Image: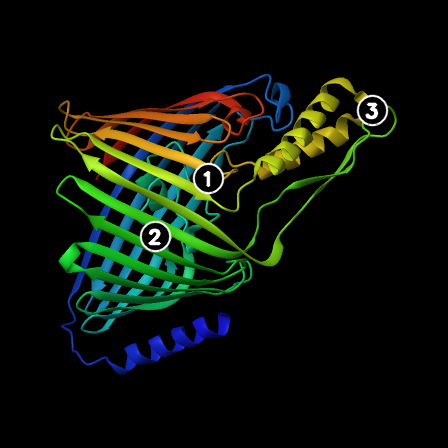
Amino acid sequence: MRKLLLLIFAAFTVQTFCLAQHVYSQEFNYEFSGIIYEQPSYFNIKDDSLLNPDNEILEFSEWTNRLYGRIALNLYYGNIKLISQTRPTYTVEETESDEFKLISDDAYLDISIGEGYFLFIGKRNLRDVVAYGVNPTDFLGENKEVDFTKREEERRVERKGNYVIGGEAFFNNVTLSVAYAPELDEWQDEDDRVLVRGNYFAESINTDMSLHLYHGDIPGIGFDISSTVSDNLVMHLESAFREGSEQKKTITILNQGGGMIPRTYQITGFEEDDEIYPHIVIGGSYTFGDGTNVICEYIYNGDGYNSEEWDEFTDFVEYNNDTYNNNSMFKDLAKGNLAEASKMMNFREMRRHYVFVRFSNSTLIEDIDSQLVFMVNLEDSSFLTFPSIDYKAGENAVVGLSSTIFAGENDSEFGMAYWQNDITLTLKYYF
């Protein structure tokens, strides 16, 4: 597959260069805008967490404060655009020293080389998706750090891009694009990645369809479809089929814990196998007459833990939690094992079957935009909920309040979270 993708990338690039045929006026222009955020958060940390008893394994901060900006500067000169978005960020945490980062999401050149043909090079945050709860075909965005205190759309906007070179071609109802993200020492440590995407708009049925071909550590094929059924209803499907798995799992090696011999486990790593793992999201969005919008999705993660694998993992966590609390001889070993288990958790898609539901309304009450999200694990009935409300305090100012609340048994996915809930206050100023 890698050779095929590289050949498609090379052929596409040569073709777009050969089709350059227009002369553009050399006129300079620019766009500058931004948002300044002040965002304090408080975390109600559990003292009985299986993964983090008494907050001694991770020493998680009870509060954090971020002051940052999202700055967009776009420059235009003739047929060349420079697109950039940076996030200067100053963070203060209870258990950490102050930290300043200058985060770059976008910094790339977009060059028009003919009617409907473009080349791009630089750092770019590509995000061609249709689902909301999770995004299986967001191949170049996977493993990127996101802020879960924000709404789904904002999370994808505020994240680091990849260093890429590629091109796009727009026809009547067809769009073709190719992106190559090379491995770059000290800049981009992932192996070479190539993403080829084709999009077709079936105008007669008001439906968008996309096919993704991805080469990377775990190659895959993705298919998206979004169809406007009526003025109120939009249905969508986002799916990916990956060859191989990067899911870490625990395996019991010696099961005679107690006394002088502790139980021993092995944590499996990346598996290069021929098995195909499906990841599918199917759902829809419906808007009622009063402006209330409801999104509902079923999520199937074929790479998640089945019941046997989850029982093995929870046994690993519970045994080491008990050892940490009651056996001073193996306390350090248990602490290290609990830290490893924490690295394996993401509190979003550890297992296979989920439902995502979002209710929102930005028009019900003047100047108020409210939202309520549920993410439910169908296998253990644990869930998280994310209520948020934004108040437009002026022409350029918004005050927001949000919370993430985890619920479930201690040994369930969302019940294992280190904190019961959090509260985030967000002040935004637009300029």
- x and y percentages locating residue 89 in the rendered image: 41, 39
Q: Is residue 117 left or right of residue 249?
A: left
| Residue 286 visible from this viewpoint | yes
Query: Residue extending furthest right?
Result: 260
**Residue 395 or residue 6, whichever sits in front:** 6
For mark 1, what is the residue? 100
Foreground disc of the pair 2, 1: 2
Q: Earlier in the sequence, mark 1 or mark 3?
A: 1
Label 2 amino acid? Answer: Arg
Q: Is residue 418 left or right of residue 206?
A: right
Q: Earlier in the sequence, mark 2 or mark 1?
A: 1
Label 3 amino acid? Answer: Gly
In the picture shown, does residue 3 fall above or below 145?
A: below
Q: Residue at x 16, y 78 (%)?
A: 23
Q: Quadrant of residue 313?
A: top right
Mark number for residue 127? 2
Foreground disc of the pair 2, 3: 3
Mark number for residue 258? 3
Disc 1 and disc 3 in contact, CB within 8 angstroms: no
Q: Residues within 10 Å of mark 1 (few under 14, many from 20)?
A: few
Label 1 amino acid? Answer: Phe
**Residue 121 or residue 18, whichever sits in front:** 18
Helix, strand, or loop for circle 1?
strand
Q: Residues within 10 Å of mark 3 (few under 14, many from 20)?
A: few
